[in-house]
C-alpha cells in the first residue's frame, strides 16, 4: 500500500484470493480474515505428504509474481497450519490456532508437519489443563504479581510491571507462557488481556495517593494490531479513574513490526490517550530504523538475553551500548531487563541506562509482599559510593 497505493494493494488481495480458489476449486473454502491474511480450508488431507504438497502448491502460486494492471508484483508468502483430524475443534478455535501457527512462522519458529501431527495426537493429555485454564478465567482465579522498575541512578521505584500468575488446582505453578499460548490458541487473548488490564488498573487505583507508582501491562503480540485494543484500554482507564500517564503498555518489538500499518495506528491511538508505550524485548526483532523512528514509544526495554551475557560476551555488551544510544537519540527512556547481580547494575549505570528491572532488585511479588518490600526498599547509594 505504501509503495504502490491502495488500489494496487487491493488488486493483489483479489489475485491472491483467486489463486487460492483455483487451488481448491471450491470458492467457499477461501476466506479473507483480515488485512492481508487468508484462511484456506482443505479437507481429507490426513497424510503428511498430501499436506506438504498442498502447502507447497499454495506457496508456489502466491509466491510467483501476481499481475495487477500493468504491474508484476512479488509476494512474500508465509503459511500457518492447524489440523482437525479428530474433529473436536470449533471453527473459531481452529482459526485462532492457525493465527498462532502463522505468528510462529513469522518469528522464525516454523515446525515440521510431522511435529504438528504428533502434537495433535497428544491433545487429550492437554485437554484437562485447557479446561482448568478456561475455568480459571471464568472464576477470576488468575493472580497478578508485580515487579518493580527502578531508576538505575537512585533506585527510586517509578512503576511496576504486572505479570500474570496461576496455580493449577493441585498447586502446581503453571508457566505464564503456557497461559499466553493457551489464550492465543483458543481465541481468548482479548478476554485474558482485558482481565489483566482491569485488575492492574484496579490495583493502580488502590495505590493512588499512597505509593505514587505507575503500572505497566503486557499486550500479547496477536493483539498489537487489534482495532478494539485502544478502546478497551480507554474504557478501563475511565472505569477505574486512573491518570493515563501512570499506565504503560508493553508490546514486543516483533509484534510492532508484524503488522506495521494497523499496529502503528493502534499505538498512535493509545499514545494520544496519554498512555505510555514501551517496546519490549528490543534487539531481538528485525526492525528497521527508518520505521522505528515513527513508533510513538516513550520507552525501550533491552532484552534480558543481552543483559545476561554482556559481562562475558563483548558483542552483547556492544549491542547494549548501541540500544542505549538509539533509545537516547530518539528521546526514549531505556530499561534493562534481567539485571541479576551487582556487577551488571554497575555496568549499566556507567553506560547511562535509565531504569533497571530484575532479581537483583526484586523478583515479581504478590501485592502484599510488594507493599512490604516498597516500605523497606532503601534505594541505591550515589554512584560514587559502593553499591
Image (spheres, rainbow, N blue to C red):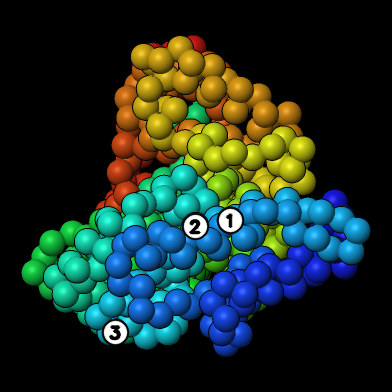
Left or right of residue 266, residue 258 in this image: left
The residue identified by callout 3 is 87
Up-down: is 241 above or below 177? below
Residue 193, x across and y down, in percent: 46, 69
Q: Quadrant of residue 339?
A: top left
Q: How many marks?
A: 3
268 shown above or below 158? below
Q: Residues within 10 Å of mark 2 (few under 14, many from 20)?
A: some
For marks 2 and 1, give the CA distance: 6 Å
Q: Are marks 2 and 1 in contact (CB under 8 Å)?
A: yes
Residue 226: mark in rendering? none
- Which residue is denoted by mark 2 in the rendering? 56
SS at mark 1? helix
Label 1 Cα neighbours within 10 Å, binned few <14 / some 14-19 / many ≥20? few
Q: CA distance from mark 3 to mark 1?
A: 29 Å
Measuring from the top left, give residue 281's x and y in whole percent: 50, 41
Nearer the observer, disc 3 or disc 1?
A: 1
298 vs 72, nearest the viewer: 72
- Is residue 94 or residue 61 the one in the foreground? 61
* Secondary element type, mark 2: helix
Q: Residue furthest left?
A: 170
Query: In the rendered view, does 269 fall on the left or right side of 167?
Result: right
Q: Which residue is mark 1?
A: 60
- Quick check: marks 2 and 3 in contact, CB under 8 Å? no
Q: Is residue 30 left or right of residue 10?
A: left
- Percent across and percent down for residue 99 are 48, 67
Q: Which secondary structure lies at badge 3?
A: loop
Name the image quarter holding the N terminus: bottom right
Amino acid at each position: 500500500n505504501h509503495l504502490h497505493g491502495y488500489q494496487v494493494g487491493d488488486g493483489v488481495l483479489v489475485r491472491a484470493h483467486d489463486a487460492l480458489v483455483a487451488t481448491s476449486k471450491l470458492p467457499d473454502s477461501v476466506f479473507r480474515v483480515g488485512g492481508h491474511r487468508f484462511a484456506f480450508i482443505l479437507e481429507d488431507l490426513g497424510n503428511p505428504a498430501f499436506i506438504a504438497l498442498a502447502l507447497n502448491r499454495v506457496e508456489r502460486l502466491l509466491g510467483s509474481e501476481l499481475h495487477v494492471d500493468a504491474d508484476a508484483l512479488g509476494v512474500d508468502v508465509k503459511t500457518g497450519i492447524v489440523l482437525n483430524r479428530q474433529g473436536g475443534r470449533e471453527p473459531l478455535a481452529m482459526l485462532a490456532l492457525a493465527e498462532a501457527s502463522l505468528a510462529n512462522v513469522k518469528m522464525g519458529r516454523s515446525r515440521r508437519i510431522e511435529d504438528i501431527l504428533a502434537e495433535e495426537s497428544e491433545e487429550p493429555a492437554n485437554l484437562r489443563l485447557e479446561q482448568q485454564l478456561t475455568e480459571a478465567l471464568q472464576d477470576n482465579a488468575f493472580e497478578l504479581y508485580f515487579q518493580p522498575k527502578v531508576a538505575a541512578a537512585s533506585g527510586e521505584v517509578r512503576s511496576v510491571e504486572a505479570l500474570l500468575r496461576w496455580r493449577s488446582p493441585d498447586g502446581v505453578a503453571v508457566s505464564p507462557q503456557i497461559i499466553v499460548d493457551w489464550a492465543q490458541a483458543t481465541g481468548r487473548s482479548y478476554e485474558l488481556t482485558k482481565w489483566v488490564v482491569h485488575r492492574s488498573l484496579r490495583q493502580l487505583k488502590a495505590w493512588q495517593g499512597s505509593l505514587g507508582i505507575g503500572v505497566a501491562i503486557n499486550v500479547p503480540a496477536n493483539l498489537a494490531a487489534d482495532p478494539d485494543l485502544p478502546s478497551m484500554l480507554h474504557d478501563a482507564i475511565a472505569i477505574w479513574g486512573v491518570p493515563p500517564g501512570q499506565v504503560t503498555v508493553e508490546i514486543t518489538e516483533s509484534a510492532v513490526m508484524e503488522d506495521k500499518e494497523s499496529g502503528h495506528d493502534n499505538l498512535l491511538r493509545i499514545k494520544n490517550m496519554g498512555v505510555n508505550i514501551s517496546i519490549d524485548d528490543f534487539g531481538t526483532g528485525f526492525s528497521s530504523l527508518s520505521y522505528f523512528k515513527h513508533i510513538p514509544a516513550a520507552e525501550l526495554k533491552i532484552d534480558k538475553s543481552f543483559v545476561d551475557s554482556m559481562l562475558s560476551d563483548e558483542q552483547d555488551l556492544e549491542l547494549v551500548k548501541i540500544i542505549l544510544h538509539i533509545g537516547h537519540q530518539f528521546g526514549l527512556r531505556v530499561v534493562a531487563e534481567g539485571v541479576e547481580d551487582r556487577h551488571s547494575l554497575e555496568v549499566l549505570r556507567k553506560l547511562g541506562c535509565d531504569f533497571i528491572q530484575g532479581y537483583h532488585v526484586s523478583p515479581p511479588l504478590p501485592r502484599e509482599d510488594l507493599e512490604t518490600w516498597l516500605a523497606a526498599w532503601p534505594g541505591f547509594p550515589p554512584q560514587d559510593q559502593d553499591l
